[in-house]
Amino acid sequence: MSLGDARWIRRAVHPGGLPVQLTFFVTSRCNAKCAHCFYGDQLNQPAERELTLEEIERVARGLPRMLWVAFGGGEPFLRRDLAEVAGVFCRWNRPRILTVVTNGIHADHIESVTRDILAKRRDTFINISVSLDGLAETHDRERGVPGNFRQAVETLHKLRALRERHDGFGFSTITTVHGRNADEMADLERYIAEEIRPDNRGLNLVRGTPLDPATLDVNLQAYGEAVERKRRDVSGGTLPLQNFSLSTLNAAKERVMYRDVERVARTGAYRAPCRAGRIGAVMYENGDVAACEILDRKIGNVRDVGLDFSRLWFSPAADTLRREIDEGRCRCTWECAVATNVLFGPRYWPELLREWVTGGRRSSVAAPRAPLPQSVTVLIPCRDEATVIRRKIRNSLNLRFPNASQSEVLVIDDGSTDRSVELIEAEIARSALAVDRPRLRWLRNRYAQGKAGAIQTGLEAARGDVVLLTDADVVIEREALPRAIALFADPRTGVVTGRQAYCERLPDDSEEAPGDPWNRRGGAVMDPPGRVDSLYDRLMRRVRSLESRLDSVLLVHGQMVLFRRSLTLEPRAGIASDDVDLSLQARRQGYRIRYAEEARFWEERPRTRSARTQQGKRHGMSIAQVLWANRDMVGRPRYGLFGMLDLPFQWALLLAQPIGLFLMLTLGTAAVIALAPLPWTLAVAALALLAAASKGVRSYLVMNGLMASAIVSMLAGRQLTDRWPRDRDIAPLEL
């Protein structure tokens, strides 16, 4: 690392300013028709719309010293002046690396243009990356060009010969992993290692809105295995990587990047602010500028501002987009954006430093992994749910199942007196002709009336490897199911719960959750606008995330909780929080209870203050009840950190805290009134009024007040049942 590299560290700490990484689609013209192409509907526009060499030079002169520039398309080598375009950036912006991605068609032409680029490179490292998406038959089929594989391999051999005669040059392969080639990765990698021997072997995960949507159905386990094989090859020295300054840091960055891409693909989890629109930019062949190639949003066109890039970059439109990216906590699987975040995001630096120091070598002790469940039973207990059951069934059938044909949606009716059964049967008839969808069926509760009996009936009838227990009045995001199932890769995981999200009103008959359309926007994942999150909601999410990492979660969400069907679970009559009690049964059997933060389900928040108060009080009473019913687990080493640390903490947080807060406020108020002079009393009162004006403070005090009220009610003899929420204040049973 040279002293000049300090500029990149400064940009990481102060990300404002012009971009230092640029993806430039130099042409939309293409001689292939790739099934996974997310840019397909914009290809082969007239060449006259492309920026001229003179226009590109004027834009480049307004940009700073660049860390990295990538040319894409279309097929970049169809642009006749590609070498001159590369020379412009090498002259004015002196990027550390300039990469050109190509499909490898017309090997002689690519070799000739590459020679010209090398003659203009100055101190820039040039990398030519050739796409190989499978062995011959697969590659030609997916690229839509007979003989493409043969021509790409010929191009790679010519580039290897060039590499041996030129410094500052490297070549690599790049593979887009998708639903139709993932199972061929190991064979392709073996061929590349034996026949081509490139400097690097890149991997892209299919993204965006491809020409063939079927390619999005990726086997992420196969992708993860390909990433792991690359890590082993690099750390073992069989994949040399390009030899340029900071190449070892670049390799460390790649390892962190691949892990983050897989994590987002599996869970949708947010980690750190995205630097798109700050550090990195995208420019299209006609001069359109965007923060990111995934978001379908353009900032503007350089031709409209006299080719002055900075006028666009610091415009109100750019500021609005950056603010939207930050507020929506945008994340995606575009490798270039993730790589930028890794290099310029301080939250990634500890992991990046560890990878840089260790060179990607891992301890010989690896966490065990189990095959992911392939079939799911969605279990919906139902009684008098005519207003919502149709929406719930359609939402459940729309989930992304690991294997839809082996999965099912099972509704258990608990003696409904409205039109629920009629509507369920209508939905069964409607779905009978659907192809590659889960089976829909319903049964009557075979046990004593109540939710516990309905759940018991469903657990006994379920056929899936995993049972998803969910309420009829909530909807689940389509991607929530695979995000939750991913945690079952740990064989110690027995239960997984999702994340609760609130909205003012759910659509009546839509099969989608509120977050689904927003998450599909250009392939990126954003938090939907208008979330209704209280301070208490945010606090409990943090608590659940910490619990999940340490051992097990206590307060699962019964609206979305997944169990291994192999568990022995018996819903107990008289327990209101049946979801928590069932999860604790799994923990007693030695399994962990995990929290999938990005597996979201949605429900309507109660619309009246009275309804919110009743819901909060009922929630508090059920928590107190289930803690008391399972008090024998507290302080027991056999339950690990859950018994020794988490349960005592939860007793203090959920039971002792509200009582202590009430006593502290009462005694403090009395002391101020009794001992303080009038001015001090008024000052304290004023501060209290200011604090009460905060929505977060109010929600915190209200939730603790409801918990205290619930505890007092239970001590006074108030009882709960395991029946439906609308009945819990009507028909008490013995605790």
Image (tube, helix red, strand yellow):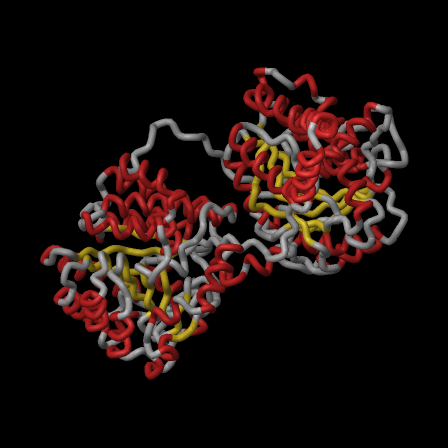
Q: Residue furthest bottom?
A: 48
Quarter holding the N terminus? Answer: top left
Q: Residue at x 58, y 45 (%)?
A: 599
Residue for point 34% across, 29% down: 363
Instruction: Locate residue 700: give its quadrant.
Output: top right
Res. 567 image quadrant: top right
| Relative image position of residue 236 (x, y in whole percent) | 24, 37
In the displayed structure, does residue 664 sit left or right of residue 40? right
Left/right of residue 349 with respect to residue 578 in the rendered view:
left
Position of residue 562 relative to residue 632, above or below, is below
- Percent across and percent down for residue 297 are 47, 68
Determine whether, in the image, residue 242 is placed left or right of residue 216: left
User: In the image, 507: left or right of 246?
Assistant: right
Asked whether the viewer can see residue 569, the reply is no
Q: Look at 60% across and 37% down and name the residue there.
A: 496
Residue 178, compared with residue 260, is above or below; it is below
Is residue 548 at least partly visible in the picture? yes
Relative height, residue 120 to residue 709 (above, below): below
Residue 155, x across and y down, in percent: 22, 63
The answer to which of 310 and 681 lies nearer the viewer is 681
Vertical comparison of 275 with 681: above or below: below
Q: Residue furthest left?
A: 165
Position of the C terminus, as image quadrant, is top right
Q: Residue at x 40, y 55 (%)?
A: 275
- The x and y percentages for residue 646 are 59, 25
Figure label count:
0
Observer-nearest residue: 659 or 471?
Answer: 659
